[in-house]
Image: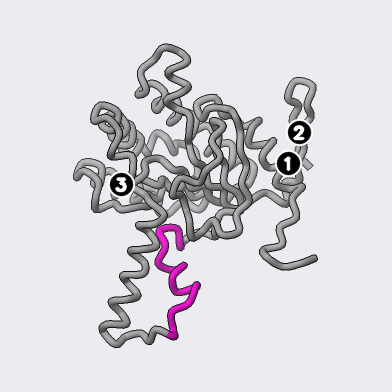
């Protein structure tokens, strides 16, 4: 049993029942910056630093994988200045992956429509994935240019082409065959998805994979999110009865 004191609140959870895969919608960066009179880019930079701390902590307690929603297919509609700042942050994170992973056993995977990213970003995606591919620790999936509906649509197109080519019968299409074509097929579906900043929606994130995920909401903006919030989430998660549609 793990214990951590948070002011007068004692947080405890069973380290043997840690969620294997955690999804994170990193929300509230802009609001965090606005409250401090800073540009939105400063909030995104603070959020990137928070992700590093959370990944390091989660790896230390035995979480196997994290999928972090870094940039959605809809985020291209934001002001160019903000999009450019987000791309610069992503570039820096990937280009400095050796430093970001220093002393850690984490694996970096970038999931989403990689072909739709600028060439300079695509190059660093290859670099970051290459230098961490032999590691055996926590898998960090950075969801970039990611959209859940697009992901399902693309998987469906792959199967449709196989049917058209006579390689597959429609009756042979199963949930498993679709799951194998999802961007996150290399990890289990998320046990729990975290959404900070007070919002209560999924925002096109892991629509297929989240069918039986638990959800955990917080009013804390992502840049202020801490290991103590992870502790609280896990303690809450372990109180839930996951029946996956069945009955106990």
The residue located at (76%, 46%) in the rendering is 14
- Answer few, some or many: residues within 10 Å of disc 3's Cα (few below 14, many 20 plus, some between 14 and 19): many
Which residue is label 3 attached to? 125
Q: CA distance from mark 2 to mark 1?
A: 7 Å
Which disc is residue 11 wearing?
A: 2
Which residue is tagged 1?
235
Say few, some or many: other residues with alpha carbon within 10 Å of mark 1 (under 14 / 14 to 19 / 20 or more): some
For the residue pair 196 and 106, the one nearer the viewer reads as 196
- Determine the secondary structure under disc 2: strand
Q: Which mark is residue 34?
A: none
Q: Is residue 145 left or right of residue 148?
A: left
- Tell me which numbered mark, 3 or 1, is placed earlier along the sequence: 3
**Distance from label 2 to label 3 (Cα)?**
37 Å
Marks 2 and 3, the one that precedes in the sequence: 2
Please say if the residues under marks 2 and 3 sit with CB atoms less than 8 Å apart: no
Q: Is residue 209 left or right of residue 30?
A: right
């Amino acid at each position: 049993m793990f214990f951590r004191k948070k002011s007068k609140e004692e947080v405890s959870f069973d380290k043997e029942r840690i969620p294997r895969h955690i999804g994170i919608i990193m929300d509230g960066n802009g609001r965090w910056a606005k409250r401090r009179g800073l540009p939105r880019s400063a909030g995104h930079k603070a959020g990137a630093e928070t992700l590093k701390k959370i990944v390091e902590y989660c790896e230390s307690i035995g979480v196997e994988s994290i999928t972090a929603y870094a940039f959605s297919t809809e985020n291209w509609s934001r002001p160019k200045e903000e999009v450019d700042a987000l791309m610069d942050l992503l570039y820096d994170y990937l280009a400095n992956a050796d430093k970001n992973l220093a002393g850690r056993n984490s694996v970096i995977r970038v999931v989403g429509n990689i072909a739709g990213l600028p060439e300079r970003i695509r190059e660093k995606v290859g670099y970051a994935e290459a230098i961490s591919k032999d590691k055996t620790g926590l898998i960090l999936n950075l969801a970039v240019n990611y959209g859940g509906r697009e992901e399902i649509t693309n998987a469906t197109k792959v199967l449709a082409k196989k049917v058209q080519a006579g390689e597959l019968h429609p009756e042979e299409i199963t949930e498993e065959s679709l799951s194998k074509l999802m961007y996150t097929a290399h990890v289990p579906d998320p046990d729990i998805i975290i959404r900070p900043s007070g919002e209560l929606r999924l925002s096109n994130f892991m629509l297929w994979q989240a069918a039986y995920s638990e959800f955990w909401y917080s009013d804390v903006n992502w840049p202020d999110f801490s290991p103590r919030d992870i502790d609280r989430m896990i303690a809450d998660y372990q109180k839930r009865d996951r029946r996956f549609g069945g009955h106990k």
